[in-house]
Amino acid sequence: EDVSSLPGRPPVVTIMGHVDHGKTTLLDWLRKSSIAAQEHGGITQHIGAFVVKMSSGKAITFLDTPGHAAFLSMRQRGANVTDIVVLVVAADDSVMPQTIEALKHATAAKVPLIVAINKIDKEDARVDQVKADLSRHGVEIEDFGGDVQVVCVSGKTGLGMDDLEENILTLSEILDVRAETDGMAEGWILESSVKQNGKAATVLVKRGTLRPGDFITAGKTWARIRALRNEAGVELSEAPPGTPVEILGWRELPDAGEQVLQSPDEAKAKTAVEYRLEMAEREESSVQLA
Ligand code: GTP
Ligand code: NA
Ligand code: MG
């Protein structure tokens, strides 16, 4: 598929790493707010997804990952929602089980990796140990002749954060991601929950543009889009490719990891969902027979 003539879209950068290694703190620095401090108990309860206007003016979409369940589900369906993975490794803790898990994701998705060795402000930081451990786990870091960039940072003091931002921007420019903005839209459910104002799902638009009034399906449910909102709760008139948006208007709550497909009208959305329900029922009864 020749995409070189298509419009550019924000690259999607996913921050992965072991629990408490500082993913949210780093993201926080990048968007200069204080999400980590506000989070209940400091544990990320949902996938944060938002667009950051970098100092260069370029927009980059960042995804924070508390767990990797939705990503696993999307990957199993052959979807690569992310263009770049930033792997956060705490310098005082080094490579841990979820670090290895994140590495597996990045490798399987064939997505370029940037390693951020975080918490280098700490007295017990062991940067060389982390590099050796990463290397032992097959990460071809630049220090040992590979091409994976390693940036030493502190999300607490901001040390090295300019370099991290720079590396992300440089890699984004090399990747030069593009997508169709017209035609039937397509995307993925990153998270979903019942909120005060109804059933809400965060959707990452992959191609096409979603607008209020549009019909979309996601697995066994569908929506007539009542509202599109960004992470700050601001209502949007449209969501082009690379944009994460909260969507309201679902009949039932869709599952994280489901594919979102636009339908031309309500009847077609309903038919698509009915068909999927029927297929699922058939599969179930054939399993029971076997
Ligand atoms: P989960 O979402 O729970 O997996 O954690 P996380 O990876 O998002 O880590 P988070 O940003 O919540 O940070 C965990 C703890 O480490 C918090 O207490 C942070 O203040 C602290 N922390 C993060 N970055 C740094 C750093 O660079 N230096 C120091 N000293 N502490 C840090
Ligand atoms: Na945490
Ligand atoms: Mg977090």
Image (cartoon, rainbow, N blue to C red):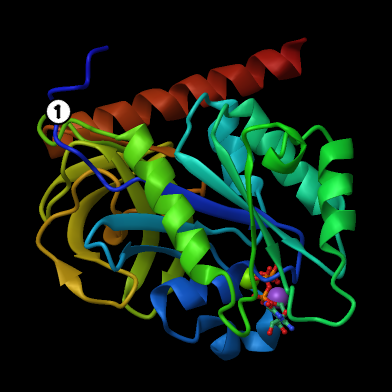
Residue 14 location in percent, x, y? 52, 51
- Please tell me whether residue 261 is drawn above or below residue 41 in the rendered image: above
Q: Residue visible at 90% across and 56% down? A: 129
Residue drawn 74% across the image and 73% down it: 120
Residue identified by numbered label 1: 6
Q: Residue furthest bottom?
A: 38
> Percent x, y for residue 118?
70, 68
Query: Which residue is drawn at the image coordinates 17% and 71% (left, top)?
Result: 235
| Labels in figure, total | 1
Q: Specify the quadrant of the image occupied by residue 194.
A: bottom left
Q: Is residue 226 left or right of residue 116?
A: left
The part of the image, by quadrant, that contains residue 149 is top right
Quadrant of the snapshot with the N terminus: top left
- Mark 1, residues whose alpha carbon is within 10 Å: few (<14), some, or many (≥20)? few
Q: Position of residue 175 (x, y in %)?
A: 37, 34
At label 1, which amino acid type do we have?
Answer: Leu
Nearer the observer, 113 or 220: 113
Task: Please tell me which residue is depicted at 72% across the width and 32% down the height of the picture.
Answer: 145
Q: Quadrant of the C terminus?
A: top right
- Can I make out residue 188 in this image? no
- Say above or below: 123 vs 51: below
Residue 9 visible, this orientation: yes
Picture quarter with ligand 3: bottom right
- Left or right: where does residue 192 sit relative to residue 23? left
SS for dot 1 = loop
From the viewer's side, name the closer residue of 126 and 63.
126
User: x and y percent of residue 257 in the render?
Assistant: 51, 42
